[in-house]
Each structure stands twice: as structure tokens, then as C-alpha cells.
Image (cartoon, helix red, strand yellow):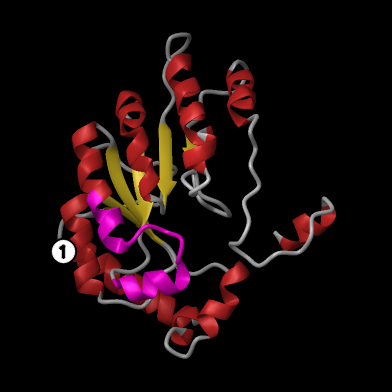
Amino acid sequence: LAAWRKLVGLPDAPWGSYVEVRRNAPEVLRRELETAPPLPIKFCPVASDPYHAVEAREGITRACLEVLREDREKRPPRDVLVLTRGALVRRDFDLLGDLGAYLGVSLPTIDDEVRAHFEPRGATVTERLALLRDARFAGAQTFAVVQPILPGNIDALADALAETVSSVRVAVLEGEEGAAADFRDPRYAPAREAAWQADRAQELGEALGARGVALWTSELPPSS
């Protein structure tokens, strides 16, 4: 993202310290739905998150979900998937339930001290697990993504996920992006190694399987 900011003439800024707001996203979505193929619509935090704190003021994600609900009056419904680290998603349980959406959280560790080190602006581990439990009652299909795997008790993580979701996607670290400094901390440096990631991924996969939790690698989680 640093190269992109330079390309468009924006000043350099520390990773995680800025958000580029695209206020026209709902209008663009409404227009593109008219001609786009009937593929799933995904709100996923690859380099961002649909429920940043600024969403409480801007309401862009909610407006996009409303566009998708309106679109169902015109044509067959699309699958909708939302993945977040933010507790603000609770505000939109009504829309997610109406859409029968897949709602997932990123949960790379069960240890909230580790979470706070790598994701200081994200919801706590307790908050993420609680919103998954509550989302089920709202009609959403819940899942979790563990990527990358961060230090923490694997059995405790598997137990917590087994209580809140029916499926989990497990994947290893794929580049450090702006988190290189976080991984240089001696407490967490081993987690940047490919062998460490692979071993923990296998351990977690086996623990989840033993608890009856499905692992998925396809485009969408299995339906509940």
C-alpha cells in the first residue's frame, strides 16, 4: 500500500494509521449489480475491514448491504459473505440476517495479549466469539478464518471455535506487509517462520476435525 499511496500522490503514513473512505461505494455497487454476473459479494479485510471504527460515522458498509437487499427484489439473490475483526458488525445483524449472509471473524489467536499486539484496533477475542454466538440467532451463517496463525493455545482456540462456528478456514502467513515490526518482537518472531506456521496449521486442523468442525478452502464456507 505504500507504493500505491506514492502513486496517487498521498504522503507516506504508518501501516494501520489511515483509512481511505470511498463514499460512492453504494452507488457504484448498485450500478454494477445491473450487469455483473451472479457471483458472491464479499466484504473481506484483505488490506482493510468493512467495520473500521470510521464505519460508525460513514455507514458505507451498511448502505452497501441495503443495496444488496434491495437488489433481491429485482433478480435472484446472490450469496453475501462478510469477514471482519470489528464488533461494529453487530449494528448490521438485521441486514445480515435478511440476506442469509455468511458472517465470519478473523481469529488468529485465542490469546488476547497477542491479539492486542498485532491487532490493537480490532475487537477483543472475547468480543469476536460473542458476536459469532449472537449472529447465529440473527440468522447469519457463521464461520471463522485463522490466518495467519499467531501464538496461543491451539486446543483452547479449537474449543472456542467449536462452540461458535460450523466451519473454519485455516491458512498460513503469506507475507508480513506492514506487520514486519510486530513479528520482530522476540516473543513472536518464531511465528514468521514457514515451518512454524505449517506445524501449527496442521495441529489446529487436527484439533478442529476432532471436534467436528469442518475445514474449508472453497470460495464460500459450507452452508449451515
Quarter of the figure with the N terminus:
bottom right
Residue 166 visible here:
no
Which amino acid type is shown beneath numbered disc 1? Ala
At x 21%, y 55%, the residue is 213
Q: State left or right for residue 152 relative to residue 5.
A: left
Circle 1 residues within 10 Å: few <14, some 14–19, many ≥20: few
The magenta region covers 111-130
Asked which quadrant contains residue 172, the reply is bottom left
Q: State left or right for residue 18 relative to residue 79.
A: right
At x 22%, y 65%, the residue is 158
Looking at the picture, does residue 173 appear above or below residue 58? below
Please provide percent x and percent y for residue 11.
Answer: 79, 60
Give the SS element for disc 1.
helix
Asked which quadrant contains residue 89, the reply is top left
Magenta span has 118? Answer: yes
- What residue would you read off at disc 1? 210
Q: State left or right for residue 219 relative to residue 166.
A: right
Please provide percent x and percent y for residue 50.
Answer: 49, 44
Magenta span has 7? Answer: no
Residue 201 visible here:
yes
Please provide percent x and percent y for residue 70.
Answer: 45, 15
Residue projecting furthest to the top: 74
Q: Main secondary structure of the magenta part?
A: helix
At x 21%, y 39%, the residue is 136
Looking at the picture, does residue 146 appear above or below residue 94? below
